[in-house]
Image (tube, rainbow, N blue to C red):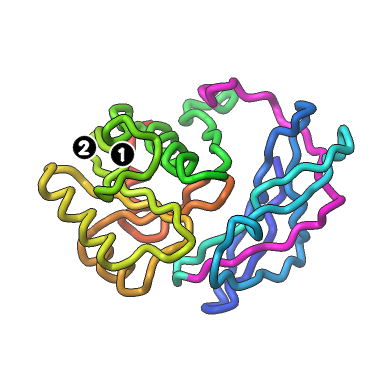
Protein backbone atom coordinates (compact mmCIF):
# COMPACT_ATOMS: atom_id res chain seq x y z
CA UNK A 1 0.00 0.00 0.00
CA UNK A 2 1.28 3.49 -0.84
CA UNK A 3 2.30 5.75 2.03
CA UNK A 4 0.10 8.78 2.67
CA UNK A 5 1.45 12.23 1.83
CA UNK A 6 0.47 15.36 3.85
CA UNK A 7 -1.05 18.05 1.63
CA UNK A 8 -2.07 21.51 2.86
CA UNK A 9 -4.79 23.40 0.99
CA UNK A 10 -3.36 26.73 -0.22
CA UNK A 11 -6.74 28.43 0.23
CA UNK A 12 -8.06 27.40 3.67
CA UNK A 13 -4.80 25.83 4.95
CA UNK A 14 -6.58 22.63 5.96
CA UNK A 15 -4.23 19.64 6.02
CA UNK A 16 -5.18 16.44 4.19
CA UNK A 17 -3.68 12.96 4.16
CA UNK A 18 -3.38 11.98 0.49
CA UNK A 19 -2.79 8.44 -0.77
CA UNK A 20 -1.04 8.42 -4.17
CA UNK A 21 -2.92 6.23 -6.69
CA UNK A 22 -1.54 2.91 -7.90
CA UNK A 23 -2.01 1.66 -11.47
CA UNK A 24 -1.17 -1.62 -13.20
CA UNK A 25 1.68 -1.22 -15.69
CA UNK A 26 1.46 -3.10 -18.99
CA UNK A 27 4.11 -5.47 -17.60
CA UNK A 28 1.74 -6.41 -14.77
CA UNK A 29 3.64 -4.68 -11.96
CA UNK A 30 1.81 -2.16 -9.72
CA UNK A 31 3.05 1.40 -10.20
CA UNK A 32 2.34 4.00 -7.52
CA UNK A 33 2.67 7.58 -8.69
CA UNK A 34 5.63 8.99 -6.74
CA UNK A 35 4.23 12.09 -5.02
CA UNK A 36 7.04 13.57 -2.85
CA UNK A 37 6.24 13.83 0.89
CA UNK A 38 7.13 17.54 0.78
CA UNK A 39 4.96 18.13 -2.29
CA UNK A 40 3.78 21.69 -2.84
CA UNK A 41 0.28 21.63 -4.32
CA UNK A 42 -0.53 23.74 -7.38
CA UNK A 43 -3.87 25.52 -7.45
CA UNK A 44 -5.91 24.12 -10.34
CA UNK A 45 -7.79 26.95 -12.01
CA UNK A 46 -8.50 25.42 -15.41
CA UNK A 47 -8.13 21.79 -16.42
CA UNK A 48 -7.03 20.70 -19.89
CA UNK A 49 -6.70 17.13 -21.11
CA UNK A 50 -3.11 17.68 -22.19
CA UNK A 51 -1.96 18.93 -18.78
CA UNK A 52 -3.88 16.24 -16.92
CA UNK A 53 -1.38 13.45 -17.67
CA UNK A 54 2.13 12.83 -16.41
CA UNK A 55 4.89 10.55 -17.72
CA UNK A 56 6.23 8.11 -15.10
CA UNK A 57 8.69 5.28 -15.69
CA UNK A 58 7.86 1.82 -14.30
CA UNK A 59 10.64 0.63 -11.93
CA UNK A 60 9.96 -3.00 -12.86
CA UNK A 61 10.21 -2.89 -16.68
CA UNK A 62 11.62 0.61 -17.25
CA UNK A 63 8.70 1.41 -19.55
CA UNK A 64 7.54 5.03 -19.46
CA UNK A 65 3.76 5.45 -19.47
CA UNK A 66 1.24 8.29 -19.31
CA UNK A 67 -0.84 8.36 -16.10
CA UNK A 68 -3.52 10.72 -14.69
CA UNK A 69 -1.86 13.55 -12.80
CA UNK A 70 -2.71 13.36 -9.05
CA UNK A 71 -5.32 15.85 -7.84
CA UNK A 72 -6.99 16.56 -4.50
CA UNK A 73 -10.26 18.37 -3.82
CA UNK A 74 -10.64 20.24 -0.54
CA UNK A 75 -13.95 20.73 1.25
CA UNK A 76 -13.55 24.51 0.78
CA UNK A 77 -13.97 24.03 -2.98
CA UNK A 78 -10.31 24.30 -3.94
CA UNK A 79 -8.82 21.68 -6.27
CA UNK A 80 -5.04 21.24 -6.30
CA UNK A 81 -2.68 19.34 -8.54
CA UNK A 82 0.23 17.48 -6.95
CA UNK A 83 3.75 17.19 -8.40
CA UNK A 84 5.18 13.82 -9.40
CA UNK A 85 8.82 12.69 -9.56
CA UNK A 86 8.80 11.28 -13.13
CA UNK A 87 11.59 8.70 -12.76
CA UNK A 88 10.92 7.50 -9.24
CA UNK A 89 8.06 5.08 -9.71
CA UNK A 90 7.36 3.18 -6.51
CA UNK A 91 7.77 -0.62 -6.86
CA UNK A 92 5.66 -1.47 -3.83
CA UNK A 93 3.86 -4.67 -4.55
CA UNK A 94 0.30 -5.41 -3.53
CA UNK A 95 -1.74 -8.56 -3.64
CA UNK A 96 -3.37 -9.08 -7.01
CA UNK A 97 -7.03 -8.13 -7.03
CA UNK A 98 -9.59 -10.02 -9.07
CA UNK A 99 -10.14 -8.47 -12.55
CA UNK A 100 -13.64 -7.31 -11.63
CA UNK A 101 -12.56 -5.82 -8.31
CA UNK A 102 -14.81 -8.27 -6.50
CA UNK A 103 -12.33 -9.49 -3.91
CA UNK A 104 -12.86 -8.49 -0.33
CA UNK A 105 -10.07 -7.41 1.93
CA UNK A 106 -8.39 -10.46 3.47
CA UNK A 107 -9.76 -11.43 6.85
CA UNK A 108 -12.54 -8.82 6.89
CA UNK A 109 -16.16 -8.54 5.93
CA UNK A 110 -15.57 -5.15 4.31
CA UNK A 111 -16.91 -4.21 0.90
CA UNK A 112 -14.85 -5.22 -2.16
CA UNK A 113 -11.83 -3.11 -3.02
CA UNK A 114 -12.83 -0.40 -5.49
CA UNK A 115 -11.08 -0.53 -8.84
CA UNK A 116 -11.42 2.80 -10.66
CA UNK A 117 -11.51 3.39 -14.42
CA UNK A 118 -8.93 5.89 -15.69
CA UNK A 119 -10.73 8.77 -17.40
CA UNK A 120 -9.45 9.67 -20.86
CA UNK A 121 -12.77 10.41 -22.58
CA UNK A 122 -16.27 11.63 -21.66
CA UNK A 123 -17.53 8.04 -21.89
CA UNK A 124 -14.92 6.96 -19.36
CA UNK A 125 -16.27 9.55 -16.92
CA UNK A 126 -19.78 8.09 -17.11
CA UNK A 127 -18.40 4.57 -16.76
CA UNK A 128 -16.33 5.57 -13.70
CA UNK A 129 -19.37 7.04 -11.94
CA UNK A 130 -21.47 3.99 -12.79
CA UNK A 131 -18.81 1.63 -11.44
CA UNK A 132 -18.47 3.66 -8.25
CA UNK A 133 -22.22 3.67 -7.54
CA UNK A 134 -22.44 -0.06 -8.14
CA UNK A 135 -19.52 -0.51 -5.78
CA UNK A 136 -21.46 1.44 -3.17
CA UNK A 137 -24.30 -1.03 -3.58
CA UNK A 138 -26.67 0.63 -6.08
CA UNK A 139 -26.92 -2.43 -8.32
CA UNK A 140 -29.72 -1.15 -10.56
CA UNK A 141 -27.80 1.85 -11.91
CA UNK A 142 -27.78 1.94 -15.73
CA UNK A 143 -26.86 4.48 -18.39
CA UNK A 144 -29.76 6.58 -19.60
CA UNK A 145 -30.99 5.38 -22.96
CA UNK A 146 -28.17 2.85 -23.14
CA UNK A 147 -25.79 5.55 -24.39
CA UNK A 148 -22.29 5.47 -22.85
CA UNK A 149 -21.65 9.19 -23.47
CA UNK A 150 -23.02 12.00 -21.27
CA UNK A 151 -26.72 12.57 -22.02
CA UNK A 152 -28.06 15.85 -23.40
CA UNK A 153 -30.90 15.74 -20.87
CA UNK A 154 -28.47 16.15 -17.99
CA UNK A 155 -29.21 12.71 -16.52
CA UNK A 156 -26.56 10.15 -17.44
CA UNK A 157 -27.38 7.30 -15.05
CA UNK A 158 -30.64 6.05 -13.56
CA UNK A 159 -31.69 3.28 -11.21
CA UNK A 160 -31.34 2.18 -7.63
CA UNK A 161 -33.47 5.14 -6.54
CA UNK A 162 -31.00 7.59 -8.14
CA UNK A 163 -30.77 10.00 -11.05
CA UNK A 164 -27.16 10.92 -11.78
CA UNK A 165 -25.41 13.66 -13.71
CA UNK A 166 -21.79 13.22 -14.80
CA UNK A 167 -20.09 16.46 -15.89
CA UNK A 168 -16.85 15.64 -17.76
CA UNK A 169 -16.17 19.19 -18.97
CA UNK A 170 -13.19 21.34 -17.99
CA UNK A 171 -15.43 24.04 -16.47
CA UNK A 172 -17.02 23.91 -12.99
CA UNK A 173 -20.54 22.48 -12.79
CA UNK A 174 -23.02 25.37 -12.65
CA UNK A 175 -25.94 26.33 -10.45
CA UNK A 176 -28.31 25.60 -13.33
CA UNK A 177 -26.89 22.07 -13.70
CA UNK A 178 -27.46 21.38 -10.01
CA UNK A 179 -31.03 22.71 -10.01
CA UNK A 180 -31.94 20.81 -13.20
CA UNK A 181 -30.66 17.57 -11.69
CA UNK A 182 -32.68 18.19 -8.53
CA UNK A 183 -35.84 18.73 -10.63
CA UNK A 184 -35.18 15.48 -12.53
CA UNK A 185 -35.00 13.76 -9.16
CA UNK A 186 -38.33 15.23 -8.08
CA UNK A 187 -40.04 14.07 -11.28
CA UNK A 188 -38.56 10.57 -11.00
CA UNK A 189 -39.12 10.38 -7.22
CA UNK A 190 -35.42 9.60 -6.91
CA UNK A 191 -32.38 11.13 -5.24
CA UNK A 192 -30.11 13.24 -7.42
CA UNK A 193 -26.35 12.69 -7.35
CA UNK A 194 -23.77 14.73 -9.24
CA UNK A 195 -20.22 13.87 -10.34
CA UNK A 196 -17.87 16.50 -11.77
CA UNK A 197 -14.32 16.49 -13.11
CA UNK A 198 -13.73 20.25 -12.76
CA UNK A 199 -15.50 20.89 -9.47
CA UNK A 200 -18.47 23.16 -8.80
CA UNK A 201 -19.19 26.87 -8.89
CA UNK A 202 -19.59 28.34 -5.39
CA UNK A 203 -23.28 29.11 -5.84
CA UNK A 204 -23.81 25.57 -7.18
CA UNK A 205 -22.24 24.09 -4.04
CA UNK A 206 -24.33 26.27 -1.75
CA UNK A 207 -27.52 25.37 -3.61
CA UNK A 208 -26.66 21.66 -3.55
CA UNK A 209 -26.28 21.85 0.23
CA UNK A 210 -29.69 23.53 0.49
CA UNK A 211 -31.27 20.86 -1.73
CA UNK A 212 -29.48 18.00 0.07
CA UNK A 213 -27.88 16.96 -3.21
CA UNK A 214 -24.73 14.79 -2.93
CA UNK A 215 -21.74 16.19 -4.83
CA UNK A 216 -18.70 14.16 -5.85
CA UNK A 217 -15.46 15.28 -7.45
CA UNK A 218 -13.67 12.84 -9.76
CA UNK A 219 -10.01 12.94 -10.66
CA UNK A 220 -8.61 11.36 -13.81
CA UNK A 221 -7.92 8.09 -12.00
CA UNK A 222 -11.72 7.66 -11.92
CA UNK A 223 -11.87 7.80 -8.12
CA UNK A 224 -14.74 9.96 -6.77
CA UNK A 225 -14.35 12.04 -3.61
CA UNK A 226 -17.32 13.20 -1.54
CA UNK A 227 -17.45 17.02 -1.46
CA UNK A 228 -20.35 17.74 0.88
CA UNK A 229 -22.13 16.22 3.87
CA UNK A 230 -24.86 14.72 1.70
CA UNK A 231 -22.30 12.82 -0.35
CA UNK A 232 -20.72 11.54 2.88
CA UNK A 233 -24.14 10.42 4.05
CA UNK A 234 -24.80 8.60 0.75
CA UNK A 235 -21.57 6.68 1.16
CA UNK A 236 -22.30 5.84 4.81
CA UNK A 237 -25.78 4.50 4.19
CA UNK A 238 -24.92 2.57 1.04
CA UNK A 239 -25.12 -1.20 1.24
CA UNK A 240 -21.90 -3.03 2.04
**Residue drawn at (45%, 57%), measured in percent from left and top?**
169
Q: Position of residue 185 (x, y in %)?
A: 17, 48
Compared to residue 114, the image places residue 181 above or below, namely: below
Q: Where is residue 158 in the image (x, y as percent from the top left)?
A: 26, 37
Q: Would residue 100 be counted in the magenta stretch?
A: yes
Residue located beneath label 1 in the image? 157
Q: What element carries label 2?
A: loop
Compared to residue 225, the image places residue 148 above or below, namely: above
Which image quarter is the C terminus in? top left
**Residue drawn at (37%, 49%), measured in percent from left and top?**
166
Question: Which region is colored magenta?
Answer: 78-104
Q: Main secondary structure of the magenta part?
A: loop
Q: Rate crowding at label 2 as few (under 14), some (14 to 19) or many (20 or more) other CA atoms within 10 Å.
A: some
Q: Position of residue 155 (x, y in %)?
A: 27, 46
Front position in the image: 60 or 113: 60
Q: What element carries label 1?
A: strand
Q: In this view, does 203 lie to the left or right of 51?
A: left
Front position in the image: 83 or 47: 47
Q: Where is residue 129, by image quadrant? A: top left
Q: Would residue 54 be counted in the magenta stretch?
A: no
Q: Rate crowding at label 1 as few (under 14), some (14 to 19) or many (20 or more) other CA atoms within 10 Å.
A: many
Q: Residues under labels 1 and 2: Cα distance?
A: 11 Å
Mark seen at residue 161 = 2
Q: Where is residue 98 in the image (x, y as percent from the top left)?
A: 59, 20
Which image quarter is the N terminus in? top right
Instruction: Name, please, the residue furthest toward the front.
Output: 152
Amino acid sequence: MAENVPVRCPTCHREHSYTPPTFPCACGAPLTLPVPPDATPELLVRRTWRDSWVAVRCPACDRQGQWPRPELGCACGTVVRLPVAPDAGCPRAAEEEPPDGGGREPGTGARPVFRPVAIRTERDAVMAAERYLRWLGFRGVRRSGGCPAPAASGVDLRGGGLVVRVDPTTLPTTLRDVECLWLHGLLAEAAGVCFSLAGYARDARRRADDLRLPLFLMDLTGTPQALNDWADELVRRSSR
